[in-house]
Amino acid sequence: MLKLLLGAALFVCCGYVGYGVSTHYRRRYNLLVGVIGYIDALINGISYLQSTLAELTSGYAGEKKDDFGKMLAKYILLLKNGSYRKEDCAAILRSRLLTGYEQNALAEMLYSLGKSDIDTQLSELNKYRALISPIAAEAGNNYKKYGSLAFKLGILAGLAALLITA
Amino acid sequence: MIKDLLPEGIFDLIKQGCNLNEITEIRLRTGKPLSVAEYGVYYFPADKDGHIYTVTKEDVEYVLGVATKHSVYAINNQLASGFLSCEDGVRIGVSGEGVYKNGKLFTVKNVNFLCIRIPRQIFGCASELKGVIEDFDNTVIVSPPGMGKTTVLRETVRLLSEKGKNILLIDERNELSASVNGIPSMDIGPNTDVLLFSSKKGGYADAVRAMRPDIIATDEIFGKEEIECLSDINRCGIKVLATVHAKDTLSLLKDKTYCALAAFTRYFAELGELGKITTVIDKERVKKC
């Protein structure tokens, strides 16, 4: 009975680890897709509405509760506080879902927003879009490739543990 | 306002060396020393060791960011006109690289030079115009930049307004009234209406039709078109009080564009010293103050 309980516990643990790895790939992909969506929203908003950055960001973030939505909520607070430094932008992007390089690039982007004229701002945003797009595409491929695989491997490892202990 | 507008380090430095209530101008030039003016006298703020602070690109970006609510892209028109208006009448002159579209200045990029001007009200600075105010007729205040024309104009408006004249103040850059949400924070008198951020030309036409002022007051007449507008207003029976940049009245009237002012202006008041009218020229006589 004890062995069966141990096996069940191992099964749950392995399944949970597999699910966790799969979720990591999904969240990373969604976050990067969110970044591209935000850049697109800014490009449109700056081109046509010329609203303030806080308004455009609030309009995009809305009620989003995902990882990037939470980051943007913190960014909106920075904007409303009046002044902020590059380190403040870096702090809100600190996440295991992004590499150090990605965190730096996005912090640079957030810090640069609203600091230049319309032409320069749009060209910078397009530059960041071009930078993030292939990374997001790769994250999407990884999610498809390894996301479900990790979950299945977790379940299989859990079953194996269950069999061995039973 | 100034505290919010400046990076903390710069504000602390200025606070240490200057009287915050007397600062009239702060200049930020990337790579150059920070300079601060107290009623026209410039200082270079330094730290305790005597090191003069050098302005960085980040400092300029910070001020622009705060002044535009982090949305420089949204103020192309203001950048193209060379200044930003902030709360409390603070005006930020901007200079950088002009971007032209269809032959017109569209915006300014790579802004590296800022001139923050803080309006100050000095009661009594127009006392030399007492006679003019008693028997008001078209008046132009003449001085080079930075001598306090705007301050004297504001005080003259206040005094005329207190005499019961209905005045329309055309405040293109919110320097005269320093309005917050459209309410003047400077004392401009009880009978003064303010038209904010309107071009002089548009303001004149609307004002004559809608507000029926006795006097129209405006800052910094520039170019033939504005002089023609003032002449038109005068033809309608409305008196004019304005300022203009020039070394003195003589050099103003020697100019082929500005000599047209003489056709309808009775008084030319010259600022020979900072914030002080030293000469009032009447068409009939010259009076030395």
Image (spheres, rainbow, N blue to C red):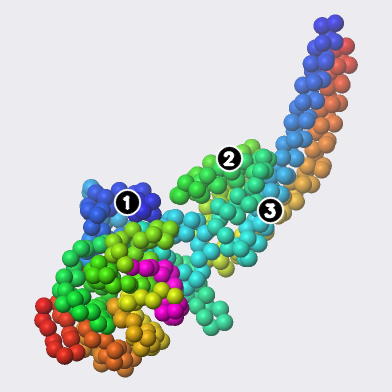
Q: Quadrant of the C terminus of chain B?
A: bottom left
Which residue bears the numbered disc 1? Answer: B11
Which residue bears the numbered disc 2? Answer: A94
Q: Is residue B90 visible?
A: no
Residue B208 inside the magenta-drawn segment: yes
Q: Position of residue B96 (x, y in %)?
A: 43, 70
Q: Position of residue B124 (x, y in %)?
A: 18, 65
Q: Chain of mark 1?
A: B
Q: Are marks 1 and 3 on the same chain?
A: no
Q: Chain of mark 3?
A: A
Q: Position of residue B212 (x, y in %)?
A: 39, 76
Span of residues in magenta: B192-209
Q: Residue at the spot x=41%, y=74% of the render? A: B211
Q: CA distance from mark 2 to mark 3?
A: 18 Å
Name the amino acid, label 1.
Phe
Most distant residue in the left direction: B288
Tell me the crowding category of disc 2: few under 14, some 14 to 19, or many 20 or more residues within 10 angstroms, Cα based. Answer: some
Q: CA distance from mark 1 to mark 2?
A: 30 Å
- Tell which of B136 and A62 is nearer to you: B136
Judge whether B221 appears above or below A86 on screen. Answer: below
Name the amino acid, label 2.
Arg
